[in-house]
Amino acid sequence: MKTPAKKSRRSTNGLSSQVDGDGAQWNLRLYVAGQTPRSLTAFKNLKEICEEYLKGQYHIEVVDLMENPTLARGDQILAIPTLVRKLPQPIRKIIGDLSNTERVLVGLDIQPRSN
Amino acid sequence: MIKQSRRNRLRPLDGLRKERTGIPGFDEITRGGLPSGRASLVCGSAGAGKTLFAMEFLVRGATLYNEPGVFMSFEESSEELATNVASLGFDLNQLIDDKKLVLDYVFIERSEIEETGEYDLEGLFLRLGHAIDSIGAKRVVLDTLEALFSALPNEAIIRAELRRLFRWLKEKGVTALITSERGEGRLTRYGLEEYVADCVILLDNRVQNQISTRRMRIVKYRGTSHGTNEYPFLIDEKGFSVLPITSLGLSHKAPTEHVSTGITRLDNMLDGKGLYRGSSILVSGTAGTGKSTIGAHFVDAACRRGERALFFAFEESQDQIIRNMRSIGIDLEKYVKKGLLRFHNARPSSWGLEVHLAMIHKTISEFKPSVVVIDPITNFLAVGDRTETKAMLTRLIDFLKSREITAMFTSLTSGGHDLEDSEVDVSSLMDTWLLVKNIETNGERNRGLYILKARGIAHSNQVREFLLTANGIQLVDAYIGAEGVLMGSARSSQIAREKAADIDRKFTLERKQRELRRKQELYEAQLIALKGQYETERDAILRELEEEKQRQHDAAEQRLAIARLRRADNGEVQFKGNGARKSRKGAVAR
C-alpha cells in the first residue's frame, strides 16, 4: 500500500519513515518543522516505541511542514512535533517530543489509561 | 475630494503609522486606525461583536484599501464565518476567490490530544506564515487566540509561544488584530493584554432598563492620542459603525441663509425670512397642539424647495403621518416617492439612547438631508433620564449644526406645568423656540402660537392663533385688546361686537355731521333774516333822518318865506336862517 519511494518524498535526511510488515495496521504520521533537535528526538522516540510494541505492523510517515506548510491544515496541526495516528481509527494526536513513553502508549491506545 | 479632505483630517499628528480599518467612525476616534505593523487587541464579553469587528477590519481592508488579509479562526469554521457575515453584505467566498482573503479554521479537540513532552507551536506559525505569504496579506486576525489555553494543557508553553508569536507578527510587518474574551476583573481571561501592548479596544454590550447598548472604548493606544470616551456603536445590515458623536464642539459655522418654516405667517413673524439654515428649532406644547403638523409643514417646504428631508417619528408610523397630514392638505407621499423625504420610525423603547443617537447619526450620514424633524424628543425620557437625554440631544444638535442641517424638535409638555418649563431642559440648546399652547376659555380650546425666542432674528412678540384648516396651518391674529387675549369663538364674537360698535360709531358720526350741516343751514338762514331786518331798520332810520333834514330845511325855507313876506329887517332871522355859513362869513368880515 505504501511504497518506500512515496515515503521518502516526504521525509528529510535523518528522519526516515519506515514500514515493517505488510499489514501496517498502524498508520502513523509525524509532523515536524525542519530538523530541529526536538524533531529528531521525537522521531527517535517514536521509532523505539514502535519497534518495541508494534513491530511489523506500523508505518511511519514524516511530514516536514517547512517544506509543505499547506499540510498543516489537513490534520489541524499547531504544535510541533505532533504525531497523528491515522489508523486505526479514530484519529489520535500526540504532541511533544514523545519522551514520555507511558503517555505515548496511552495516546496511541496501545496501553489502557491507568486511571 | 471628500475622501481627500477626510484623509488629511485623519492624518495622525504623531509619527505612528496607522492602518485605516474602514469601519465608519473607528478611524476618527483612533485618529487613523490601528497601529500599522503591530498587534492590537479587541476584547469584550461574548456577543460583544469582536469577531465581526475583526472580520470587518479585513473585509474593508481588502475591498477599500486593497490590503489582503488572513483570518485565523479558532472558534468558527470558515463556512460558519462566511454565512454569519453574509448577512452584513460581506461575500467572503468572493474575496477568497480573488485572493484577497484567507480563512483558516484552527480546530483543536482537547480530548484527541495527548501531551508527551516538549513541543512548540511552530505548526501554527507555519500555517499562519503560509497563509500570509500566499496572498501577500497585510492584515491578520486571530480570533480567539485564547482557545489555545483550553486546547493545550501546558500554559507555560502557550505563554512563551504567544510572546514569540507577537514578535514574529511584528517582524512580518502585518497589522494584526487579536480578539479575546473578557475576563473577570481584567480585560482578558488569560491576560493577553500583557503581550499586546500597543492598542487595546474594549467592546461592551450593556443592558440598562432592559435595553442593550453597544459601546466601544479605546483602553490604550500607545504613542498616539485618541478619543477616550465610550462610543456607542451599531451592528446592522451594513456592518459595524462607531459613532464618535461626543467629540464635537462649538466650532460650527453659522450660515446666514434663511429657510422657510413652510408657514408664511410664521415666517413673517420671524422677520419675514424664516429660520437660519443650520439652526435648531424647538416646538414645544401640550398634547394635540399641532406640533407634528408644524413639523410636517417644515418638511413639506423643504421638499418643495427640492431639498432632502428626514422625519424621525417616535410616535407614529409613516403611513399614519402621511394620512393625517393629507387631511390638512399636505401631501408628503409624493416626496417620499421622489426620494426627497424619508421617514425613520421607531419606538423609543426599542433601543437605548446611544443607539437612537447612533441610528439618527447613521441615517443622516446616509441620506444627507438638509432638514430634519425629530418628533418628539420628549419620548427619549422613557429611555434615559433627563441628564442623559440632554447630553444626547446636545451631541445630536452639535452634529446637525456641523452639517448645517436645519433641525426641528418637537417636545411634549405635560399639562399642569409651566409651559415654558421645557421637559428636557433643552431650550438653551435651541436657537428658536416656538411655543404652541392650548388656551381654554369659554368652554373651548384654541391653539395659540408664539415665539419664545429666536436667536439673531427680529421676531414678533405677539401671540397668534393658529388654525388647522384643509389648507394646512393658518395663523390668525389673536384678538388683543382691553378685554385681554381672545381666541376662537370668543375672538370672533369680540370681533363681531367690535364691528357692531364700529358701525354704531359710524352712524353716530354721520348723524352728527348731518346735524352740523343742519345747524349751519339754520344759522346761515338766521343770518340772512337778521341781515334783512337790519337792512330794513337801517333804511327806516335813514329815511327818518332824511325826512328830518328835509323837514328842517323846509322849516327854514318857510321862515325865510315868512320873513320875506313880513319884510322883516331883523337880520337875525335871516342870519339864523342861513345858518353857520352866514355867521362864518360875518366873522371873517369882521
Image (cartoon, coloured by chain):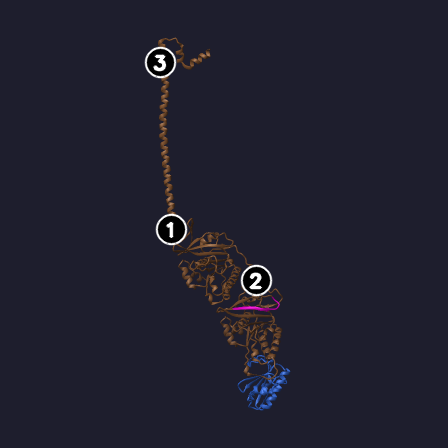
Q: Residues within 10 Å of mark 2 (few under 14, many from 20)?
A: few
Magenta residues span B214-224
Comparing B459 with B415, the one in front is B415
**Residue B278 visible to the viewer:** no
Give the colour chain A carries in the figure: blue
Color of chain B here?
brown
Q: Earlier in the sequence, mark 3 or mark 1?
A: 1
Q: Which chain is disc 3 placed on?
A: B
Task: Mark 3 vs mark 2: give the one in front.
Answer: 3
The disc label shown at residue B558, or none: 3
- What's the amino acid at mark 1? Ser
Q: Is residue B568 above or below residue B490?
A: above
Q: Residue furthest right?
A: A37
- Residue B584 versus residue B87: which sits nearer the camera? B584
- Mark 2 — residue? B5
Q: Which residue is mark 1?
A: B493
- Measured from the top left, where is residue A71 in percent x and y? 57, 80
Q: Which mark is first along the chain, 1 or 2?
A: 2
Kind of residue at badge 3: Gln
- x then y, percent, for residue B67: 57, 70
Q: Is B508 within the magenta?
A: no
Q: Secondary structure at mark 3?
A: helix
Instruction: Classify 10 Å Cα crowding around label 1: few (below 14), some (14-19), many (20 and above).
Output: few
Quarter-wise, where is residue A52 in the image? bottom right
Q: Secondary structure at mark 2?
A: helix
Which quadrant would residue B106 be assigned to in this image? bottom right
